[in-house]
Every structure is written in C-alpha cells, then in structure tokens.
Amino acid sequence: MWLNGRLNGYDYNRCHPNCDIESEENNENNFEESDECESDIDETINETIEAEEEFIFNFENIPNFILYNPESDQTTVIDIRPISVNCNTLQFPDTAYAEFMELVLTHHLSNSAGNSVLKWFRKHYLRNDVILPTNVKQGHNFIYSMNIEHLSYLKTKVLEYEDEEYYLYHRPIFDAVKELLSNADILKHCKWEFIAEYNEQHERIYGEQWTGLWWKRAQNSLGTTGFKKILSIILYSDATTLDHLGKSSEHPVYLSLGNIPIWRRNKRDAKVLLGILPKLKSHHNRKNNKANFISAKRILYQHCFDIMTEPIFKSNGLDIKMNNQIIWAFPFLSEFIGDLPEDAALTLTYNSSRCKRPCHICIITINDLNNPNFPQSQIELRTPYNMQFILNENYCHEYSIHPMRNIFWKFW
C-alpha cells in the first residue's frame, strides 16, 4: 500500500499503482488488531459488520483505559562507519574470531556444523596467535554480551486497561535504519536520487521507488542542494504463528528501505525487526464489553505505531555518516506492506467485504466495486483531507470508516 503525506513541512506527491495521489506524508496508517492472528485483527468477519458498524461513540470514554506516551530523544545522526572507525562497541578478541562468527551468521550454520569447521581448522591450519571461540555457542554468547546500542530493544509501557499493563517491545526506528545501512552489501546498492529509466522504445518505465515522479517531486521540494537525499522507509507487518498448532502468535513489525533495489530488498538480511505489537488479552472481550474491547484494540495499535514513527515526524533531517562522505537524508514513510486486515486497520476502514464502501483506497460503493466500466473520473480517493471532513461531519458510518482520528494525519 502506497501512502501519502507531508513530512516536516515538505509536500510530497506519491503515486498509487493506478492513481496519482496528491499527498503528504509518511503516512503509515497503522493496522490495529492482532488477537489471535489475522482472523482476530477485527474480530471475525461476521462479528465485524455488527460490532464495527453499529458502535459509534466517543472512544476516549472507554472505562479503565489509560494510554502512556514515552519520552524519546531526537536522533540527528546515523553513524554507519565500521567499528574500527567508530570505536564505541566492544570488539572481538581477534579478527579471525569476528570473521568466523560472521560466516556462521551469514550462512546460518548450526552449532554442530560450526563446531566441525572449528575442529578441522585446529587440526590442520590454526596458528598459535589466532584466537577463535571454543565452540559456536561460546561465540554466540560473546556476541549477545556486546553492548551494541542500535541493536537494543526497549520495553515501553503503552497502556493500562482494566488493571492490566501492556508493553510495546521495539527499537528506535533510526536504530533499525542504522542496522540495515551498516551492512556494506546493502549500502553499496542504495540509491539516493531520482533516476528516470526508459525501455528500448524510449518509454518511461517504473519499477523501483526512485524511478517514480513522486520521488522527483519530493527531491525537488528539498531544494537544489545536492547533499539532501530521500530516505524511503517501508514497514511491513502481519500476524505470525509461533507454533505448529497455531495456539501462539505475535504481531511483528519489520522495516526495510525503498532506497534498496527490489532484488536486494527481497533477501532476508534486507529487512530488520522494528518491534512486536502488544495484543489485548481475550478476557477483556466480554459480551457486555465488546464495543469497548474492539475500540480499545484499534486505539492501542494506532498508538503503538504513533510511538514507533514519532521520530520521523520530529526529524528535520539526518546525517548518515560513512567512511568517505556524509549524506543529509530526509526520512519519510513511503510504503506499508500488509494483508487486507492490516490495510483496514491502517486506514481505519471497516474490515468487512460486505460493508457499504469496502475499498481501503477509494470510497466507491460495494455495488460498483466490481464494475469494470465505472468511470475513473468518478473514483474519489480516501485522502486524509476527505476522511477528516467525513469524521468532522459525522458521516463515518456512511463511508465505512471508524469514528476516530488516524494518527498518521499529523504528517499531512
């Protein structure tokens, strides 16, 4: 899903695959819910129609519901120079030690496979002045003991609800960016400027984010200074089952960058874990509390994304320090990848295929949704401006949206 919005006073026009969306922001409308995988993101489909469309009330009056807003420092520098240059981290006892553990992690060697390699080296080639771990487990423990600040996660209290405390496990979003850009193989493929691409017939082709006109407009809005670059942030989330029986699940949020080419971004090391979203316990979902419970889940997940994306809203640019240059980058959320339940929660639209206006992108009615002859000129998008007007005029039910402000409207 492409997002639209304005970041830090700069207007960006972003494009949807079939529409030119005027927009502003780092809009990453959050997906709300995750109780027991996707089916619980908004209750079941049948319950959703009744529970979501029927209850329109002031969510701020939910009993025993207290949100917490943590204080956070503003990041202005991302230092991705090697440890040998930026010596703030505990170093390995030997270069061979570090290179061996890098091989283990890169190729996902099991403990037994890694131990066999160590045994072979000691038998045939290991010099007395070379230090290696006794076994792979010892090497892993050494890495875990390192105090690497940008790899640390925070436990942030975000909610008290009916005497239960809920925590968001996450890392600062620019620390996640630093982890990606610290990978030399990723950094060398990153693109920071608009590039127009053409086919053999000299026709414009669009594939990567930086080939889109919205990237060009965003870059131009930053001014003519060549040092100002676009840092395109992509978020992805989906409920994930943790066991074969499907009885345990979590809702992780991953981060990648639109500056990375698609072929490279599809590799597993081109995305990093940003956080784990909390989920309300099922005992809150009582029959006489269903309306409050559904709204509480929606508010909680919006609030969690508000916390995780707040540094972007506050940022006036970042200095990305490399060995031989500094890039002045302006971050924005360009894309959110998720399934239909996530799309519904991101846009705060009804999560039901049977509601009056089921599309998360436009306000076309369900009767016209499958009409291939419907005039494109009559398709009206769900822009932040339109949705705010609908909310203010109390037309939410008519347009299949929830009666609450989307936290990403602040970017607009």
Image (cartoon, grey):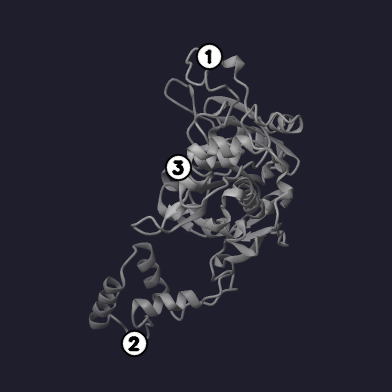
Residue 112 location in percent, x, y?
A: 27, 74
Q: Between marks 3 and 2, how big is the CA–CA gap? A: 45 Å
| Residue 15: quarter of image | top right
Amino acid tagged 2? Asn
Q: Between marks 2 and 1, how big is the CA–CA gap? A: 77 Å
Amino acid tagged 3? Ile
| Residue 362: quarter of image | top right
- Can residue 132 be seen here? yes
Label 3: how many Cα within 10 Å (few below 14, some 14–19, many 20+): some
Tell us which disc is closer to us: 3 or 2. Answer: 3
Tell me whether circle 2 and circle 1 mark residues in contact (CB < 8 Å): no
Label 1: how many Cα within 10 Å (few below 14, some 14–19, many 20+): few
Indicate the secondary structure of the residue bearing disc 3: helix
Residue 263, compared with residue 281, is above or below; it is: above
> Disc 2 marks which residue?
128
Indicate the secondary structure of the residue bearing disc 2: loop
Residue 374, labelled with which disc? Answer: 1
